[in-house]
Image: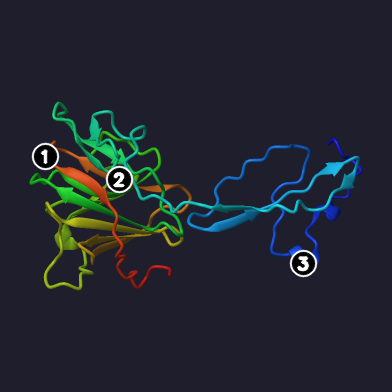
Amino acid sequence: DRYPNLDLASTRPFPEDSSFTIIYEGPQNEFHVKSLPSNEQHWFRVRACSNNIMSRWCNKTLSVKTKEERGFSWDRAASHKETVISMEGQRVQRSPSSSHWVCAFGNKAFNLKRRYATIKVSGDSPYLYVGVAYKGAPVAEAYNNVSVLWRKGSGDLCFHGVRLNRSKLPSVSSASGELCYGGGDVVGIMVDVKLGKVAFFCNGVLARTASGLRTDVDVLPFVSLGSADVVAEFTTESFIPTTPRDFSS
């Protein structure tokens, strides 16, 4: 508004500067850049306008290396108040004083690049579900119609509030016998946000897949804890299993 006669076309990069992209044009002398891809190098430079005359590009270019994205942690604000989350945010369990189901959300939604999470399970109690839920799901129910969860021990799948007995589900495991998970196992969750699919792995081996996830809302890691004995801990796994055949690449 301060420069109504300014020819904005003149602010475009010169041909030799085609590798740069204009991210802001306007009167502000301060600009914040957000949501840059992680673990990448970026270069920035500026030029000013005075009395409708555009200066040359500043001969000093700022170079910025964004940090590698951190893994998942449990979201204290979004989780049930009777969950106990470790200081670093990786471990969650139910408070010993609680007598009902409590749930915890992961702090990041799955997306096209961030599509796999691993959770190590500890404890003997079978009262644990691991899976995903939509943002805003209730956090005081074992499972509901806005979550897709895999039960510890039994291997039953609870899909959008419908509990599907393991014996009625087709096996997708490449291992001999039907895979379930228990204490000491690592549960992998892979989400295809494009096609609305989710896959569950036990120690890197595919155990269960399901289709029908909503693709218009955020899908986050989610656990339901029905006992203080069980612990769900995010792990950093360098190994990512092979994408299931019917998932997008």
* Residue 222: mark in rendering: 2
Query: How many labels, in total?
Result: 3
Residue labelled with disc 1:
229
Q: State the SS at label 1.
A: loop
State if disc 1 and disc 3 touch (CB < 8 Å): no
Indicate which label's residue lies in the foreground, 3 or 2: 3
Callout 3: 10 Å neighbours few (<14), some, many (20+)? few
User: Where, by quadrant of the figure, is residue 138 drawn?
Assistant: top left
Q: Quadrant of the N terminus?
A: top right
| Distance CA(mark 3)–CA(mark 1) | 63 Å
Q: State the SS at label 2.
A: strand
In the foreground, 193 or 45: 45
Callout 1: 10 Å neighbours few (<14), some, many (20+)? some
Q: Position of residue 62 (x, y in %)?
A: 64, 51
Please name the colour scheme applied to the rendered image: rainbow
Q: Position of residue 165 (x, y in %)?
A: 17, 56
Residue located at (23% from left, 39% from top): 92
In the rendered image, the vertical position of residue 219 relative to residue 2, given as above or below: below
User: Where, by quadrant of the figure, is residue 246 drawn?
Assistant: bottom left
Residue labelled with disc 3:
16
